[in-house]
Amino acid sequence: MVETMLMLAVVVGGVALFAGLVWWVNWRIYGRFPTFEQYQCLHPDSVKNGGCRCHMCGGQRVFLQHLDGELDRRRHICVTCGTVLYRSRT
Ligand SMILES: [Zn+2]
């Protein structure tokens, strides 16, 4: 009985640790990129008249990528060169 409880504790602990690690890695990836406000400060020439352009290639087409398991967090990526421009939340 004690062994079963111990096994259960190890399994639950392991799963919790793994889930925490996945969440942490996602958060780190997400947090590397500036918010829209920060992007605007970093590249004032790229954000004009409500439009946003890529600071690397000047491309105006941007697509949204949702981070795995974090549907309210998105990255805005340049279609032309693949540069991550900024992050946002829904
Ligand atoms: Zn680009």
Image: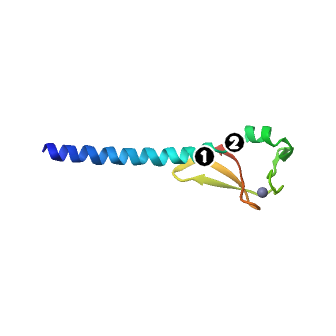
The relative height of residue 20 versus residue 62 in the rendered view (above or below) is above
Identify the element where label 1 is drawn: helix
Tell me, for residue 12, which label it has, or none: none
Q: Is residue 13 left or right of residue 20?
A: left
- Measured from the top left, where is residue 60 in percent x and y? 81, 56
The answer to whether residue 1 is visible is: yes
Look at mark 1 in the image and give the residue it sits on.
Answer: 30
- Measured from the top left, where is residue 36 in percent x and y? 73, 41
- Nearest the viewer among 18 and 67 is 18
- Quarter of the image where one finds residue 49: top right
Tell me, for residue 34, which label it has, or none: 2
Distance (Cα) linking label 1 and label 2: 9 Å
Position of the N terminus, as image quadrant, is top left
Residue at point 75%, 60% (across, down):
81
Q: Residue furthest left?
A: 1
Q: Amino acid at mark 2?
A: Pro
Residue at point 82%, 48% (across, down):
51
Q: Is residue 30 left or right of residue 24?
A: right
